[in-house]
Image (spheres, rainbow, N blue to C red):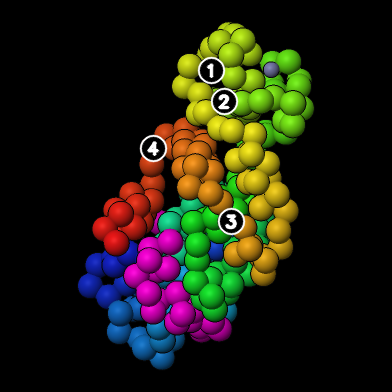
Amino acid sequence: MIRSLDYGESDRIVTFFTEEFGKVKGIAKGAKRSRRRFVNALEPFSRSELLFSRRSSEGLALIEQCDVTDHFAGIRSELETTLAASYLVDLLDRFSVEGKRNPDLFRYATDFLREIDQGGISEPMIRIFEMRLLKFAGYEPRLDRCKICGRPLEEMGYAVFVPAEGWLRCRGECASRSPDKGSDGIAASIGTVMTLLAGMQLPVEKARRLVLTGRQAEEGRALLTGFIRHLLGSEPPSYRVLEEVKNRF
Ligand SMILES: [Zn+2]
């Protein structure tokens, strides 16, 4: 379940990310009254078995029944983990298309939620999720070489990531070349980029092993959230809430 909205007196509009049908948006009629059919099932980031039928006249699937298979109580037990999971699920919503299957992304996202349910979440794990999600959604940032001169990452010295291109450029001459002149480029050291790429290769159960230095964390955050902001046209509000709460502690 990725989103749920009250609708009228007793209904709810719910968005699910499913293994077989991709993103499904539907209406759960009488959800607020029928505890039997929808017991706790319409809460964000719970995993459920879903029974739904053809689309209603409003273009929504009719959710007949929903049974929770995993409630992820661990995620809900701590504010920062809850907010981080809300951000990840928000990204899942924004980068998936209704009716388009993406079983690899489904598996990855559910494994990831299970992992943070059991052991909490770290900032480097958020970066790993962002990168994997972008890859599954077809927007993988190109970080292995310079778009302009083709120099491999290891030889670049210092790099600039250009969100409008989704590519790295060498800082200096390549960055100032048109098109775009890399003017909105995000600076990143090679060490940061290599660490992010290594983190991306980690299987879910080892994701928490990724450690970033203060500077790597800052550059990685700027690079990925800058790219995501460019792709979505704005910063997801769930990200802003997560950052605000983090800064208060
Ligand atoms: Zn270059």
Q: Which residue is mark 4?
A: 234
Provide residue 53's location: percent of width, then percent of height: 54, 70
Residue at figure coordinates x 40%, y 83% from the top left: 40
Q: Is residue 147 left or right of residue 1?
A: right
The residue under label 3 is which amino acid type? Answer: Val
**On screen, 216 above or below 246?**
above
- Badge 1 marks a residue whose secondary structure is helix
The reply to whether discs 1 and 4 touch (Cβ–Cβ < 8 Å) is no
Separation (CA) of disc 2 from disc 4: 21 Å
**Disc number placed over residue 211 in the picture, else none:** 3
- Where, quadrant-wise, is the C terminus in this rendering? bottom left
Residue under label 1: 182
Say if residue 134 shows up in the picture.
yes
| Closer to the eye: label 1 or 3 | 3
Q: Amino acid at mark 2?
A: Val
In-front residue for pair 140/246: 246
Disc 2 + disc 1, Cβ < 8 Å: yes
Q: Earlier in the sequence, mark 2 or mark 4?
A: 2
As shown in the figure, which amino acid type bears the numbered disc 1? Gly
Tell me where residue 36 sits by quadrant: bottom left
Residue name at image x 42 percent, y 68 percent: 81
Q: CA distance from mark 1 to mark 3?
A: 29 Å
Q: Earlier in the sequence, mark 1 or mark 4?
A: 1
